[in-house]
Image (tube, rainbow, N blue to C red):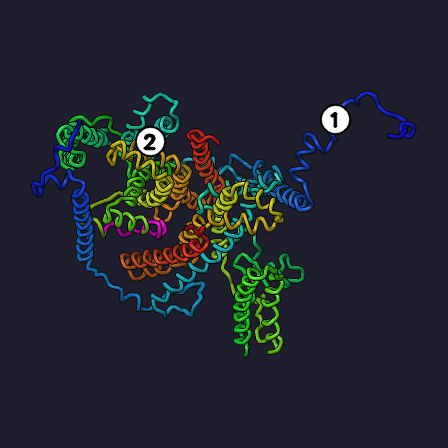
Amino acid sequence: MTTLTDIPQSQGFRLSQLIYDTRYRSITIQVIVFIAFMLVGWILVRNVTINLANLGKEIDFTFLRNPSNYDIQQTLIEYDSTSSNFRAAMVGLLNTLLVAFLGCILATLVGVTAGVLRLSKNWLVAKIMTVYVETFRNIPVVIWIIATMAVLSETLPQPSAFRGETPSASMWLWDTVAVTNRGTYIPMPVWGAGSVFVIVTFLLSLLAIWSFGKWAQRRFEATGQILPTAWIKLAIFIAPTLLVYMALGAPITFDSPALKGFNFQGGIQLSNSMIALWLALSIYTGAFIAEIVRAGILAVSKGQTEAAFALGLRPSRTMNLVILPQALRVIIPPLISQFLNLTKNSSLALAVGYQDLRATLGGTTMNNTGRELECMLLMMLIYLIVSLIISSGMNVYNKSMKLKER
Amino acid sequence: MSDQKSTIAYVRSEILEQQPAPRGQVGASKWVRENLFSGWFNTILTLVSLYLVFNLLQALVPWAFGGVWTADSLQDCRTILNERYGNTHHACWAVINERWNQIVYGTFFPSSEYWRTHVAFVLLILAILPVLFDALPRKMMWITVAYPFVMVWLIWGGSLWGPLSVAVGFGIAYFAASVAARYLGSGLTALVSVVAAFVWWMILGPIVVSALNDTVPLLALREIQSRELGGFVISVIIGVSGIALSLPLGIILALGRQSDLPLVKMICVGFIEFLRGVPLITLLFTASLLLNYFLPPDTEFDLTLRVIVMVTLFSSAYMAEVIRGGLAALPKGQYEAADALGLDYWKAQRLVIMPQALKISIPGIVNTFIGLFKDTTLVFFIGIFDMLAAAQAIRANSAWNGITWELYIFIGLIFWVCCFSMSRYSQWLERKLRTDHR
């Protein structure tokens, strides 16, 4: 029989071992990859320096400190045309984040509703939701954004329609919200003296709700007694803030928009471009989230529902305690990527002229200063950081929801 | 027991005829009751949705189906509508009829050359079919192989020698590989074939091509510049090239990310995360504004080509993540079994791992394809004359100023048909490839 005859004698290192010996081959490959990578990087950097020298430019970020010399329609922080380009970029970034944040909330609401309704036993509702999902998923979001903008500017009444003895349009919600084709006007809170206390009380009551929930959970685990937590939480949510508000004599008032001249004055103006972008992104992303939610719920096996019923849980508790926690585990990772997609798609604000990060830093600032390289790199970096923050934040949440195994 | 029979007045001695089930328990009425009105909540839902659907259809159907199909301008169209209905609350589909060429081929594409896009489109379908359906004769694959070269020739024009020489480069690579494989290991073989192909493409090929062009220009077509392309044609060109290129690139990136070599892994992770972290629109702007900075001075790089490269890179990062999911879902035993059979890395990937991993990730892959095709609309923002740009130009034109819905509905419908058929195909493929018994 075979014997161990050829024990490799140590012959020292031969050059061919670099290719044929698996111990060394990985090092060889990596060295080659490293050299190639460095070479490509070096060529790119060299090209950039030569091209910049030819154009007589240098990489220079001082333009960020210079005045921007342009106006931005919607600003969440103090800004005018004498502010720096950096501040303009920050205004744009905040606008991006605002529309992304609002979009994520609305998209989740729309998506969860549509996803659950698509599983409904009601044939008509399920079919309608299928049509919604298939329509919105298969048409580019740019078209939806442009179409929503067209809906808003063509079907909504002009401000002049609110005027006269018998106006053809009327304001919503007890004359506080005006929806026009120039934008939507909502009441603006006016912070009077003492409003700080109201806000502090409100924040404290949020804290109280959170700690009460923890306490009720511990008590439930220790004694098995269930408190009507929802009602108590609602009471904590409303009562202290309302009491302080009353006691201080209503320090926070609202400045409602009113028709003056040709347009509405007062209140906060939400531009139609923002609303169109927000609605289009939410409804588009909602269609994807609906599919994710549906898949998540379907992924929980039927035995789980049956087991919960066998334990005597009511349908609502079955949903809350058995199905949703398991479905969430399937839902959250793709949901995160949908949120990321929505945030990135908000750069399509370009189609409606909403001034987001791309329109300020990567648009007007870039055109005014002629610093394409710096502006684009900075913009990509900011988007990258935002994406990484969102995904890492959601990953933390994902970890906390994950099945705890040995 | 005791005497009871006197209390029973009548006992039936034969069985009754079987009665039909109650009306509410069979047929349509049962279906309606169970699916639409099974409780108060469902009833409300049904009524509300019926109301909404009815209102929507009432508004849309007369508008769409009462539309005008032939008119020269919006003015003309409205006159016809006014004559016909006494109002203008109907669609003017005439704009699509009248501006068909602009929407499909773009504004600048020479109309004498439209036939080339038609031939390219028919060939495209013939080339895709054998890939999609393996019941078709395998010989059709030759069309698929030849298609990229023929397509470039048909769309951009010039003589056939240029695309042919690129194809010859691939042939040389294959030939060099098969010769080298006899004497060398797999790594060196790949290196030799790549070097041979590059020598042909960079040095020998151009010389031969220019010499041949001067003597016998083979089937020379009128040259068409990239900026003359537009409309649906450019969307299909970018979409199909991106789809065809992003899958192999995505597979390579996914393998790189799963690799044991830390450096390769690091580069792949960085590449993927960067591309997934920035919006496509910034990459497209980079392609149109910044690429000149990164290229050697005085190099010209076609804008359409730049866009194809960017779109491909962007979706290959997503593709890599999808395939990585498929790779992660494979049981470890498959890798170990491939190792136990003595297959080397590439053979194991080709014969054991990839067929299964790709099958698992079909839905994700097709979703990425659909996303890529939808993303071709973004090229509008960097000045490529696609359908959205055509719509904008038509709306700015005095003849059709004021038209909105008809154009966007039409463009949306085109995308919808393409994307919906892709998703249906993927569902069909998934069912066909399903091997587990459920």
The picture places residue A64, in percent across and down from the top left corner, at 30, 66
Residue extending furthest left?
A11
Residues at discs 1 and 2 both on one chain: yes
Instruction: Left or right? Give the position of B103 relative to A153.
Output: left
Comes first in the chain, label 1 or label 2: 1
Q: Can residue B104 be seen in this view?
A: yes
Along the viewing direction, whichever of B421 and A235 lies nearer the viewer = A235
Where residue B21 appears, as percent x and y from the top left, is: 73, 29
Mark 2 residue type: Glu
Q: How crowded is mark 1: few (under 14 residues within 10 Å), some or many (20 or more)?
A: few
Residue plotted at (60% across, 44% down):
A310
Whole-percent x and y of residue A376?
A: 30, 56
Circle number at residue B113: 2
Any magenta on residue B279? yes
Mark 1 = which residue?
Answer: B20
- Determine which quarter of the picture holds residue B206: top left
Q: Main secondary structure of the magenta part?
A: helix
Q: In this view, does A89 lie to the left or right of B214?
A: right
Assign a secondary structure to mark 2. helix
Q: Position of residue A337 (x, y in %)?
A: 41, 50
Is B276 above or below relative to A243? above
* Vertical relation: A49 (above or below) A307: below
Mark 1 belongs to which amino acid?
A: Pro
Name the residue furthest right. Answer: B6
Q: Please state the extent of the stretch shown in magenta in the rendering.
A: B274-292
Pointer 1 chain: B
| Marks 1/2: CA–CA distance | 70 Å
